[in-house]
Amino acid sequence: MDNSTATLKLASLAQETRLAIFRELVQAGPDGLNPGVLAERLDIAQATLSFHLKELRHAEMIQSRQEGRFIFYSANFSAMNALLGFLTENCCSESGAGCTPDLHCEQEDA
């Protein structure tokens, strides 16, 4: 991932409503949620939700799928993990401390 792609993805999450939508979709897992359920859970108007879903899709942080008459949105877990990997790829490289895959930067005992 390059800086430009990371910036686009981070910018899509740097808004309170979009971050709430993304977190709700992460909790829902791969099955995702339809817009009606999302709007109800987050208490947002459908038009507002539609705008924010479009922004998250543009940044490829979420994906959609059609099932009959219904659309379901889900978090793009591979994009999320790639972004986390990009943010932590040089973890602690300046300090010489080791990083662990689960905890990223290890805390030194004080």
Image: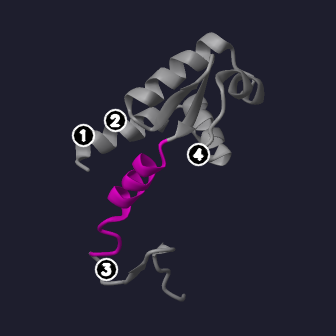
Comparing labels 1 and 4, the label whose residue is closer to the camera: 4
Q: Determine whether 57 is above or below 91 in the image.
A: above
Q: Which residue is mark 2?
A: 8
**Mark 2 and mark 4: Cα distance apart in space:** 23 Å
Q: Where residue 39 sits: x, y (%)?
A: 70, 23
Q: Is residue 22 left or right of residue 96?
A: right
Comparing labels 3 and 4, the label whose residue is closer to the camera: 4
Main SS category, magenta section? helix
**Mark 1 and mark 4: Cα distance apart in space:** 27 Å
**Mark 3 and mark 2: Cα distance apart in space:** 29 Å
**Mark 3 and mark 4: Cα distance apart in space:** 37 Å
Residue 101 location, quadrant? bottom left
Give the SS element for disc 1.
helix
Comparing labels 3 and 1, the label whose residue is closer to the camera: 1
Q: Determine whether 6 is above or below 101 in the image.
A: above
Residue 61 location, quadrant? top left
Specify the farthest residue to the bottom.
109
Q: Is residue 7 located in the magenta-colored stretch of the structure? A: no
Q: Which residue is mark 4?
A: 30
